[in-house]
Amino acid sequence: MDSSDASRQALSLARKFGEPVSMRMDAFQPFAPDALAHAAAEVAASAVFAAGTDRGNDVMARIAARLGLPLAANCIAATPGDPVTVTRLRWGGSLLEEARLHSPRPLITVAPHAVPADAGPAPPEVKPGASVDGVQVSGHVAPSHGGVSLAEAKVIVSGGRGVGSKEGFAIIEELAGLLGAPVGCSRAVTSAGWRPHSDQVGQTGTKVAPEVYIACGISGATQHMAGLKGAKRILAINSDPQAPMMLNADYTVTGDLKEIVPAISAEIRKRR
Amino acid sequence: MSPHEECGVEEAVRLIQGYRGESVVLTLGPPEATEQLRDAMAMGIDRAVHLQTDGQEWDGEGTAAALLDAIRADEAANGPFDLVFFGNESADAAGFQVGIRVAFALGRPCVTGLKKVTLEGSSVRCEQEVEDGRDVYVVPLPAVLTVKEGLNLPRYPSVPGKMRARSKPVAVSTPARPAPRLELVKLAVPAGQGRRAESLGVGPTAAPAVVEMLQKAGVL
């Protein structure tokens, strides 16, 4: 585990299975998932939990492969027993799977942003033994764009097919600039080549958790909504009041985003 | 085809175009999955292996075991694969494990969640997206890589590509389904998130209400 919210969320499910101990995801520096999986598999635990982050899922699958045991990934609930019963997120959270996990040592990852974080004391930490051979990080590339990342942004201005073209994003960028926000987009936009994939929000893009997510001309396919589960407030701007995004938002403005978005930018300037 | 897998197929096609060799697409799924195999071959994959199911759910362990057997059989007949690509996780079941299990059983290195793959002699350089940029791994061939959408921009199959795909071979077999140890009981639609949209207005006249909402939310 690490100190993140996702780890505290995993801990809240783990406590139902006994007195937890913890091992840090960054116990080996640089990150070495095979060595970490080997070390975690050596701990005499009755169950193993990890945050369902990229690294958590990666290391837990390596533990499962080593031990020859099943793995229940992406869970939002788990109840001890024989078998253990779990509830998993499928299709980016648009379907819930109830499943039985038949295993002498349940291995479970917990979907981020889906369960409350544990507020109890930090469990005692187990240090791994000697490292073993395996893949490990050997270098790092800094992000290609400066500014706030989508995953950490407090506010995001995002555009969909309704923006109309690559050039159409100028008004989205203008509003984002005024708010100090990164620009996001839907999959339709990246597939059309209007924006790089690094801007994509959704199940196969970045999962975001801003205070406000401003969705301009985004229809709101389930794959896009899957990336918004952590968003506190969604403002949808769309010409179709029946678009799924409009029905799943907290606030809506109905109409042509090409008029509305510049009007919001002008209003912000006026008040400064 | 799901987005991650489509990028894996595209990467394989590009590598073979650049370095020569043969590419094979492999899936476990019901008879209708043939359509996705044809799509992959229309993009440029040379042949397909279809492990046909009767539509029942296979868990990650069972899927990995069946794919492993098929890869071993293909390698025994046609020689080893330098690279095996998997989607990082399936769009539907989200098990996050099949590629890693296959790699472990084959005794090959596995790197997951890749956004860039570059061959460097007998090694492959892999870039994995992390919070503050990308981590780099360099692993020797043969290797197993799991990839994510954004690795590349997959091509649309051309009409001649689709024509050629019709005559490319698909080897079909029907492996026995082991009793799943992660056993699906039922699927349900989650209760709504309880969001009740509040209209801030229609058209550009809504701008002041939007700005007030942004101020109240503390982002302006």
Image: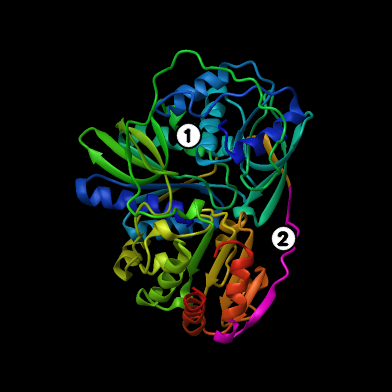
* Stretch of the chain drawn in magenta: B186-206
- Nearest to the eye among marks 2 and 1: give it: 2
B156 relative to A153, above or below:
below
Which of the two labelled residues, at mark 2 and mark 1, occupies the earlier sequence position?
Answer: 1
* Three-letter code for the amino acid on which mark 2 is drawn: Gln
Nearer the observer, B7 or A13: A13
Name the side, left or right, on which B23 lies relative to B68: left
Vertical comparison of A184 with B135: above or below: below
Secondary structure at badge 1 equals helix
Q: Residue at x 39, y 27 (%)?
A: A30
Residue named by callout 1 = B100
Q: Position of residue A79 (x, y in %)?
A: 77, 35
Instruction: Give the chain of mark 1.
Output: B
Query: Which numbered disc covers residue B202?
Result: none
Front residue (pair A215, A89)? A215
**Cβ–Cβ below 8 Å for labels 2 and 1?**
no
Q: Amino acid at mark 1?
A: Ile
Would residue A60 be visible to someone looking at this image?
yes
